[in-house]
C-alpha cells in the first residue's frame, strides 16, 4: 500500500478522490434516481414505485402538452441565445471604449445576478401586468401602437419570458466576450485596420477565431442555463395562457413536484439529457478541431 501511494498516479487519484466523491453524490446519484423514477410508477405517496419500463416516455410522446413544451423549450432557448448574443456583443464593445463612469457600469453588470430571481421576475411581472401595463404605456409614449396583453396571448407571452431571460443572461455573455476581446493583441487589429480591413472583417477573420475557445465554453454554459431555466417561466406565466408557454423544466416541476407524479416528472426532465449530451459533444469536437 505504501509503495502504491508513493507512485505519482496513485497520488493523483488520491487528490482527485474528494472531487470525484463530491461529483458522484451531487450529480450521479440524482441522475440514477431520476432514471429509476422514470422507469417506475413512483409518486410522492409511493416513492419506490413499481417497474413499468418505457411506459412513461411513450405516454409523454402522445401527450400534446408535452410536445408543445418540447418545441417551446427550443424556441425559448435559441430565441434567448440570439438576444443575449446581440446585446452582449454590443455591450462588450461599448465597454472596450474609454468613457466616464465605465467602472461603475461594469459593476452594475452583475446586478441581474445578485438580485434574487423572484425579485427581478416580479419587476417584469409589473411591466407585463394587464392592470398596470407599464410596458404598453412606455411603448405608447414613444409612439409604438402595438399594445398586446403580454401574459394573456400566446406569442406575446413567449416573447415576454424570453425578454426576462435575456435581461438576466446578457451581462454574462458580455463579460465572456469582453474577457476574450481584451486578450486580443491590439497590434494585430491595428495592422488589419491599416491594411483596409473594416470592423466586420476584423471581427470575422481575426477576433472570432482568436477568442473561439472562450466563446464556445461561454455559449455551452449559457445554453444549459437557458434550457434549464425554470424560474422565469414559472413565475411569469406558469405555462399559460392555455399551456402555450410550457417548457420542459417547468412542466417537469409542475407534474413531478406540485402534481406528485415523480415518474412523469423524471421522464420529462430526462428528455433534456440527450440534448445536453449532443450539444456538448458537438461543441467540444469543434473546439478540439480548432485547437489542432
Image (cartoon, helix red, strand yellow):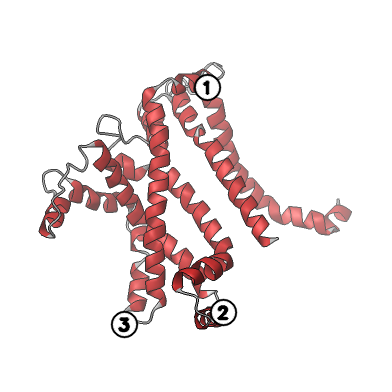
Q: Above or below — where is 157 with respect to 205?
A: above
Return the x and y of residue 59 as percentages of the image width and height: 46, 19
Q: Distance between the residues labelled 3 and 2?
A: 27 Å
Question: Where does label 3 land, which residue?
Answer: 100
**217 left or right, relative to 1:** left
Return the x and y of residue 253 as percentages of the image width and height: 39, 34
**167 left or right, relative to 212:** left
| Mark 1 crowd level (few <14, some 14–19, many ≥20, 10 Å Cα) | some
The answer to whether marks 1 and 2 mark residues whose Cβ atoms lie closer than 8 Å is no
Question: Where does label 2 land, which residue?
Answer: 188
Q: Check disc 1 and report its element: helix, strand or loop.
A: loop
Question: Where does label 1 land, which residue?
Answer: 48
**103 left or right, relative to 274:** left
**Residue 43 picture quarter:** top left
| Mark 2 crowd level (few <14, some 14–19, many ≥20, 10 Å Cα) | few
The answer to whether marks 3 and 1 mark residues whose Cβ atoms lie closer than 8 Å is no
Return the x and y of residue 193 as percentages of the image width and height: 50, 80
Amino acid at each position: 500500500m505504501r509503495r502504491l501511494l508513493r507512485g505519482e498516479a496513485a497520488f493523483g487519484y488520491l487528490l482527485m478522490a474528494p472531487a470525484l466523491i463530491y461529483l458522484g453524490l451531487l450529480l450521479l446519484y440524482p441522475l440514477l434516481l431520476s432514471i429509476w423514477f422514470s422507469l417506475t410508477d413512483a409518486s410522492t405517496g409511493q416513492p419506490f414505485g413499481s417497474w413499468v419500463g418505457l411506459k412513461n416516455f411513450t405516454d409523454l410522446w402522445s401527450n400534446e402538452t408535452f410536445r408543445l413544451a418540447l418545441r417551446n423549450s427550443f424556441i425559448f432557448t435559441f430565441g434567448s441565445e440570439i438576444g443575449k448574443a446581440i446585446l452582449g456583443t454590443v455591450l462588450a464593445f461599448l465597454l472596450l471604449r474609454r468613457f466616464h463612469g465605465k467602472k461603475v457600469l461594469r459593476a452594475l453588470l452583475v446586478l441581474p445576478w445578485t438580485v434574487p430571481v423572484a425579485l427581478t421576475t416580479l419587476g417584469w411581472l409589473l411591466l407585463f401586468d394587464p392592470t398596470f401595463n407599464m410596458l404598453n404605456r412606455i411603448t405608447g409614449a414613444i409612439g409604438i401602437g402595438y399594445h398586446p396583453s403580454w401574459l394573456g396571448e400566446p406569442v406575446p407571452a413567449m416573447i415576454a419570458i424570453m425578454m426576462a431571460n435575456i435581461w438576466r443572461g446578457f451581462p454574462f455573455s458580455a463579460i465572456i466576450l469582453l474577457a476574450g476581446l481584451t486578450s486580443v493583441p491590439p497590434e494585430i487589429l491595428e495592422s488589419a485596420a491599416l491594411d483596409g480591413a473594416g470592423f466586420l472583417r476584423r471581427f470575422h477573420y481575426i477576433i472570432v477565431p482568436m477568442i473561439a475557445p472562450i466563446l464556445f465554453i461561454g455559449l455551452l454554459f449559457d445554453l444549459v442555463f437557458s434550457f434549464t431555466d425554470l424560474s422565469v417561466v414559472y413565475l411569469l406565466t406558469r405555462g399559460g395562457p392555455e399551456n402555450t408557454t410550457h417548457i420542459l423544466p417547468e412542466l417537469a416541476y409542475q407534474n413531478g413536484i406540485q402534481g406528485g407524479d415523480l415518474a412523469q416528472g423524471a421522464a420529462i426532465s430526462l428528455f433534456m439529457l440527450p440534448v445536453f449530451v449532443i450539444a456538448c459533444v458537438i461543441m467540444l469536437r469543434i473546439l478540439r478541431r480548432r485547437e489542432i
